[in-house]
Image (cartoon, rainbow, N blue to C red):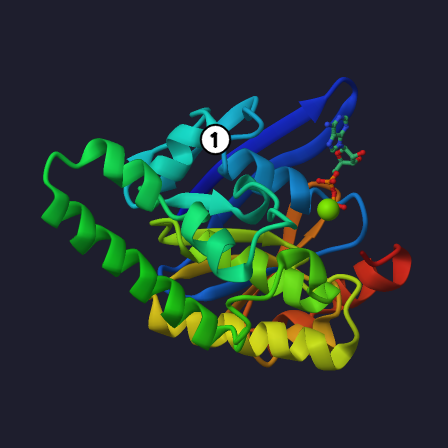
Amino acid sequence: MKVTNIRKTFGGVTALDGVNMEIDKGKMTMLIGPNGSGKTTLINVVSGFYKPDEGQVLFEGRDITGKAPNEVSRQGLIRTFQVPAPFIKLSVMENLLLASEGNPGESFLRAPLRSRWIKKESEIYNRAGRVLELLNLRLPDQLAGELSGGQLKLLEVGRALMTNARMVALDEPASGLNPTLAHKIFEHLDEIKRDFALTLLIIEHRLDIALQYVDYVYAMANGSVISHGKGEEVMNDPKVIEGYLGGTCT
Ligand SMILES: Nc1ncnc2c1ncn2[C@@H]1O[C@H](COP(=O)(O)OP(=O)(O)O)[C@@H](O)[C@H]1O
Ligand SMILES: [Mg+2]
């Protein structure tokens, strides 16, 4: 994905002030920066939730600037909260099946041939099984409402993986989790990235936890990119250190 000169203002507030980024395919890119630096706004712009005032977003070479979220997700880029919240009274497996595009019920209506429907259905089951294994969520029959907070986050990621997305943006997927669980989430994301050849853009504030898993880091402050590079480089950049000491980390 390539983001060029994105500007976004809200009334008098400049949330994004000419942001440029290149997010490599099949890599995990982390977005860091103090509270209010524009991280969430950037994810909202690239996923189609906000229209930028200026600039361009290219995804897989196509211009998706200002396209609606459902159009952007159809092109293969989603943010996790786009997958509707889990149904707490349904099982983990049922939640995964319902999140898939062309879930069994839907494909039944569309497929003119029963055999085609059965083939599609078994593909969806296989994918769900693989997702459960990767996330180490081996509780297909457990009700979503009975999962722990960490397991629910994993289920949310799993449901995003049931769509045909090639890039997933996650806004603080491990927030509120203790370090052990946060590491688990990042380990699973790393495996998923490889297994599904997925591009990941992740906002995370606990740099110490995320750093070992990410391939590339962008640091933002006041609506601009102040540093980017490999994790260690960005973490040792005086501008980043200053930005973090001078502001509240989120
Ligand atoms: N919907 C909105 N309406 C008005 N101001 C907003 C809106 N979304 C974000 N902002 C402002 O844009 C700036 C960047 O916010 P945000 O992207 O949420 O930062 P971060 O995610 O890095 O904490 C902040 O000053 C915030 O108050
Ligand atoms: Mg935010």
Asked if one can make out residue 205 in the rendered structure from this viewpoint, the answer is yes
The answer to whether residue 139 is left or right of residue 237 is left
- Front residue of 2/104: it is 104
Query: Where residue 161 sits: x, y (%)?
Result: 43, 57
The answer to whether residue 229 is left or right of residue 199 is right
- Residue located at (79% from left, 54% from top): 34
- Residue located at (34% from left, 40% from top): 105
Residue wearing tag 1: 69
Amino acid type, callout 1: Pro
Query: Where residue 224 sits: x, y (%)?
Result: 66, 44
Query: Where residue 124 sits: x, y (%)?
Result: 31, 56
Quadrant of the drawing holding the C terminus: bottom right
The answer to whether residue 146 is left or right of residue 60 is right
Where 142 sits versus 124, above or below? below
- Residue located at (64% from left, 69% from top): 234
| Ligand 1 falls in quadrant | top right
